[in-house]
Amino acid sequence: MTIKMFVEPKVRGFICTTAHPTGCKSEVQRQISYVKNQNYNIDDKSPKSVLVIGASTGYGLASRICAAFGFKAKTLGVFFERPAAQNRTASAGWYNSVAFEEAAKKEGLFAKSINGDAFSCEIKREAIDIIKKEMDGKIDLVIYSLASPKRNAHGVVWQSALKPVGEAYSSKTINIMSGEVSNVNIEPATDDEIAHTEQVMGGEDWQFWIEDLLKAGVLSHGALTVAYSYIGPEMTYPIYRNGTIGKAKEHLEKTARVLAKIMQEQCHGDAVVSVNKGLVTQASSAIPVVPLYMSIMYKMMKAKGLHEGCIEQMNRLFKTKLYHNNPLPVDEHCRIRLDDWELRQDVQEEIEKIFNQINTENVDALSDIAGYRDEFYKLFGFNCQDVDYSLDVDVELNVPSIRLEVANS
Ligand code: NAD
């Protein structure tokens, strides 16, 4: 049965509880068109079979699009999304995946998806099963792009926190919807909160995935795995890099070095972390202070012609870093740096000047809060120029490769 309904954005805090299927499709199509115009050079070194963990939104979706529509690779995407039910729209990542698979099918590209908890052993087994049965038993690239508030592991539900470590932190922050700039004071994390965040956003589960894939013999000779990290400018260090999430990212980066060794020994492969630019995604909207910094950063980077979204960043990663230079172009800590333009001295000096002056009265003039808001709505399929939002739409769409009784269970 088709459920047609009028869909509008319902924003609660830093999340929108509805998503527009036609708008999500339009955004996915825009990213696909961007990649198709980049003329990827396909040769025997380019990825042929790719697993993307966290494939439905943000950096993971953009990675999947680069692999599929740039390199024509087979892709298996893992994500945790909500299909539509009882007059409720599906989540944006669900509609994105519907659009991705439909577009892949039109081009004759293999695309399969698994909807479930990537932290679990069952989903790892299911992925290995699909690789063995439907992807010629081998993959050559594993992208780990999970962003989750919690993880179920070792019989415990671990809950991540976004807090400073050691001492309390006070800074300006913004309510993106109202534009109100206010002060926020965040108490330091407890040892427990630090440990929990590392469990959720650190590298342990990434390592479990790679060990399971190696054990199953499904990583090809020379396979590569990449996970994503963020550093950001000094002004956000207390809440990001030196905070609970930064500790987890340090753990992820250490894990990359452990995995690089294991991969080298077992399949002549490699593991690396890519430090990406700060961007509006569902995950980053939840971090205090960061959206205010990003609104200013967007304005500065757009003015300098340096602004990139998820797809431009991942295109730069795939085309000019991962499959261009051999060996991989890494910094002294073995990380690929896609945050080089964001952290340019001239960009940061100007952002800092503005950050010190900004308040509720001048935020529209001094920052790109309008652009931030626009991108936020687009994450959920709203604000797309080519979509007629007055029309009722079918909200009950299926991701073609997922059986709905499984998705709903
Ligand atoms: P996002 O919220 O857009 O995407 C998260 C993905 O993880 C989605 O596909 C979601 O379905 C999936 N997911 C969440 N929990 C899951 C679970 N239990 N099982 C299976 N799938 C699950 O996030 P994003 O901003 O694209 O972040 C991806 C990675 O990039 C993160 O490691 C993040 O720290 C990093 N990063 C983000 C930014 C930024 O500014 N957004 C910058 C640099 C690095």
Image (spheres, rainbow, N blue to C red):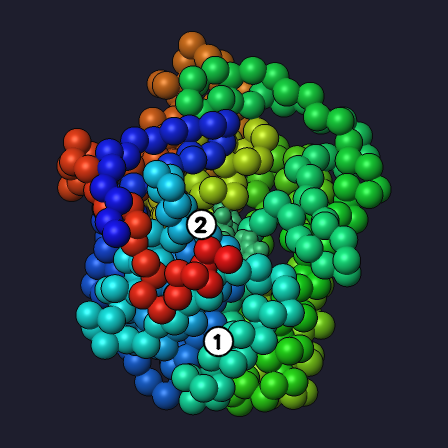
- Tell us which disc is closer to us: 1 or 2: 2
Q: What element carries label 1?
A: strand
Q: Where is residue 82 in the image (x, y as percent from the top left)?
A: 44, 50
Q: In this view, does 224 lie above or below 406?
A: below
Amino acid at pointer 1: Leu
Is the shortest distance between ligand 1 and the CB of mark 2 under 8 Å?
A: no
Q: Is residue 294 above or below residue 248?
A: above
Query: Is there any visible trace of residue 131 in the rendered image?
Result: yes
Q: Residue 338 at x, y = what percent?
A: 48, 56
**Viewer-closest of 207 and 1:** 1
What number is the disc on residue 141? 1
The residue positioned 64% from the left and 78% from the top of the image is 212
Residue at image x 56%, y 15%? 182
Q: Which mark is residue 102?
A: none
* Residue 99 falls left or right of residue 144: left
In the image, farthest residue toward the top: 361
The residue most toward the front is 1
Amino acid found under the numbered disc labelled 2: Arg
Query: Which residue is outermost to the right?
Result: 191
Q: Could you tell me which residue is drawn at 24 percent across and 37 percent down?
A: 5
Tell me what residue is drawn at x 54 percent, y 85 percent: 218
Name the one closer to the observer, 282 or 304: 282
Disc number for residue 82: 2
Q: How many marks?
A: 2
**SS type, badge 2:** loop
Judge left or right: residue 154 versus residue 5: right
Towards the viewer: 192 or 365: 192
